[in-house]
Image (cartoon, rainbow, N blue to C red):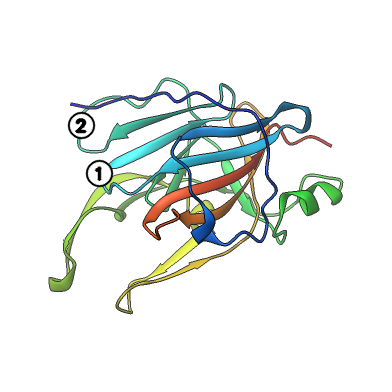
Amino acid sequence: MAILLSFPACDGILDGIYDDPLKENRKEFGFVEIDKENNSGVIYINATDYTRWTYINFHTYTIDSLEITENKSEPEAWDIAIHRYDAKTNGASVLETGFTGLPTLRTGGRIPEGNYIEDVWTENKIITDMSGMMEGKLEYAQSFYNTELSKWLFVDTGTMPPAYNPSNKVYVVKLKDNTIAAIRLRNFMDASGVKGYMTVEYIYPLEF
């Protein structure tokens, strides 16, 4: 049975451009910090489960979690979704910028130009079962997938244990309602080093 969970938001904002991933020690999930005056904040999600998508709605400051394997429709309204470190959008397009912090993006004074990438359909990106990895047997789900936003963390499975290499870049997302979000993956693990607990900084709406 699919489970939909909505999480409340809390006030506050951290910049944290150079934070050590191991310093994250949170218990709540969702839009954990919101600065409405500056249209910015922090989202904390649990993406440890290979069988779930986490749907993020910037318009309502909520997140939902849905099992991949259930034959159930996606949430009615959402903007981007995360599966482990894979990402997809709800009709948006994405650009990886050269900025490594949201404050420096603001100082640019305009929406970055470039080749904004839309989602593509994939049958071999969304891993749902890693139990057969040592035998070279992985199970995948079919889904849309955004190759540009998914660059925010490269997982090199050619080494044991796998190597995790965050891009540290800011990604600009042109949503389907023509509003714009800017996001950056600040880290991908919790205080104990468990990978899949993701801290995402955002600006929404991004306006100049």
Q: What residue appears at the point 72 percent right and 27 percent down from the top-left corner?
A: 36
Given this view, does label 1 or label 2 mark the residue nearer the observer? Answer: 1
Q: Position of residue 92 (x, y in %)?
A: 55, 38
Residue receiving disc 2: 70
| Rendered view: 70 above or below 195 | above
Mark 1 surroundings within 10 Å by alpha-carbon count, few (fewer than 14), some (14 through 19), many (20 or more): some
Please tell me which of labels 1 and 2 falls first in the chain. 1
Q: What residue appears at the point 62 percent right and 26 percent down from the top-left corner?
A: 177
Q: What residue appears at the point 66 percent right and 53 percent down from the top-left corner?
A: 16
Q: Amino acid at mark 1?
A: Thr
* Quadrant in the picture for the N terminus: top left
Q: CA distance from mark 1 to mark 2?
A: 10 Å
Query: Is 46 left or right of 24, judged from the image as shown?
Result: left
Q: Secondary structure at mark 2?
A: loop
Q: Position of residue 137 (x, y in %)?
A: 15, 65
| Residue 148 in sight in this render | no
| Rendered view: 29 above or below 189 | above
Residue receiving disc 1: 51
Q: Secondary structure at mark 1?
A: loop
Query: Is 50 left or right of 156, judged from the image as shown?
Result: left
Asked which quadrant contains residue 201, the reply is: top right
Q: What residue appears at the point 20 percent right and 31 percent down from the top-left corner?
A: 70
